[in-house]
Amino acid sequence: MLPDDDVKLGEAVEIALFCVAQETLTNAAKCSISTAYRLHIADDGIGIKPQDLLLTQTHGLVGMRQRVSARGGRFEIEQAIPHGTSIRVSMPRDRAADVNADATALAVVVTPDA
């Protein structure tokens, strides 16, 4: 059964994990010549039960799936072995962002000094 309350890891842990994930993705985007990026988060808790996977309106699963799907990515959630939960996301590189970044850089280069 899923908890009724919004369970938190603790602010310091949440911020640290978020920053590590954010910086890792930033470095991958800057330094890799990749067509896709993958994110895997797992825990060693009690695990998500198969019947809970069907409760698509809970714990942000719908939002995560929609965000990933809207960008052409893939979202997987499963019970980890021997216990815990595993979430894997695969996202294609956003080529439109590359084009926008190039155009912005070009605009900065050709803008005369004031």
Image (cartoon, grey):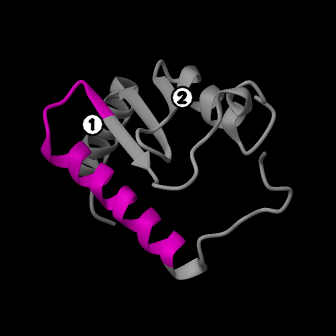
Q: Which residues are magenta?
A: 13-37
| Residue bearing mark 2 | 68
Q: Which label was assigned to residue 42?
A: none
- Judge whether 49 appears above or below 45 on screen: above
Q: How packed is label 2: few (under 14 Cα within 10 Å), some, or many (20 or more)?
A: some
Which of 89 and 104 lies nearest the eye of the viewer?
A: 89
Q: What is the three-letter code of the residue carrying label 2?
A: Val
> Left or right of 59: which side holds 9?
left
What residue is drawn where x is 59% and y is 79%? 11
Distance (Cα) linking label 2 and label 1: 24 Å
Residue found at the far bottom of this picture: 12
Instruction: Name the quarter where the N terminus is drawn.
Output: top right
Residue found at the far front of this picture: 82
> Left or right of 72: which side holds 5?
right
Which of 10 and 68 lies nearest the eye of the viewer?
A: 10
Task: Say what secondary structure mark 2 lies in.
Answer: helix
